[in-house]
Image: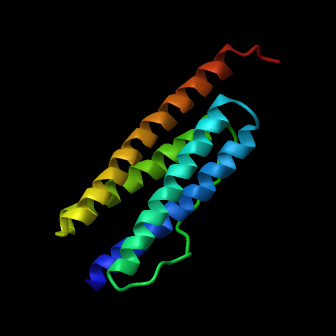
């Protein structure tokens, strides 16, 4: 059981990092549709953090407030979106690995739900990156 709790704690650290990274990018974008959509993705990550924390307690562990890697590098919005895609790809790989190790059907179901969200987020960030790249190419050059 301790191994499962440790996996959940690691996942929660990564969710915490995603929350910070995505909120930073949303707020840096200012007002607008994409900023609101990225903020909504951060709220999904908050829900994941909550789900994982509840499972930790249910399994006899303690939640964590530690945070994983937050990637705030990049000069342009498309670069930020690329970093968000990369964060989602890391999360997808992690959840696929964890699902393969979990036997409890209810926990597996919750992890599969989180995985589905992360796959959708990856697609959203890829779309935003392409949208901002096209906008930058169409903008008049100074």
Q: Residue at x 45, y 83 (%)?
A: 62
Tell me what residue is drawn at x 83 percent, y 18 percent. 142
Residue at the limit of the structure toward the right, as seen here? 142
Color scheme of the displayed model = rainbow
From this view, report whether residue 40 is shown above or below residue 58: above
Residue 66, x across and y down, in percent = 55, 75
Location of residue 3 in the rendering, given as x and y in whole percent from the top left corner:
28, 81
Q: Is residue 110 left or right of residue 45?
A: left
Give the tally of numbered discs.
0
Residue 115 screen position, x and y as percent: 34, 51
Of 43 and 24, which appears nearest the observer? Answer: 43
Asked if residue 109 lies left or right of residue 91, the reply is left
Vertical placement of 116 versus 71: above or below? above
**Rendered-image quadrant of the N terminus:** bottom left
Q: 112 and 136: which one is in front?
A: 112
Q: Residue at x 30, y 85 (%)?
A: 2
Instruction: Specify the quadrant of the image occupied by residue 129.
Output: top right
Q: Does any portion of residue 86 appear in the rendered image?
A: yes
**Residue for point 44% across, 49% down:** 88
Q: Is residue 71 visible?
A: no
Query: Residue 12's spot in the image, x, y percent?
Result: 46, 68
Asked if residue 2 is positioned above or below residue 82 in the image, the reply reads below
Q: With respect to residue 22, does 104 lie above or below?
A: below
Left or right of 86 on screen, residue 92: left
């Amino acid at each position: 059981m301790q191994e499962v709790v440790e996996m959940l704690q690691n996942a929660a650290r990564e969710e915490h990092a995603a929350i910070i990274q995505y909120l930073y990018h949303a707020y840096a974008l200012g007002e607008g549709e994409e900023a609101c959509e990225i903020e909504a993705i951060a709220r999904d990550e908050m829900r994941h953090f909550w789900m994982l924390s509840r499972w930790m307690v249910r399994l006899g562990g303690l939640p964590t407030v530690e945070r994983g890697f937050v990637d705030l590098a990049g000069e342009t919005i498309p670069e930020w979106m690329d970093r968000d895609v990369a964060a989602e790809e890391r999360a997808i790989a992690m959840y696929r690995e964890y699902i393969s190790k979990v036997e409890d059907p209810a926990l597996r179901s919750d992890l599969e739900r989180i995985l589905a969200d992360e796959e959708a987020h990856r697609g959203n960030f890829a779309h935003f990156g392409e949208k901002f790249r096209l906008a930058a190419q169409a903008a008049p050059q100074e």
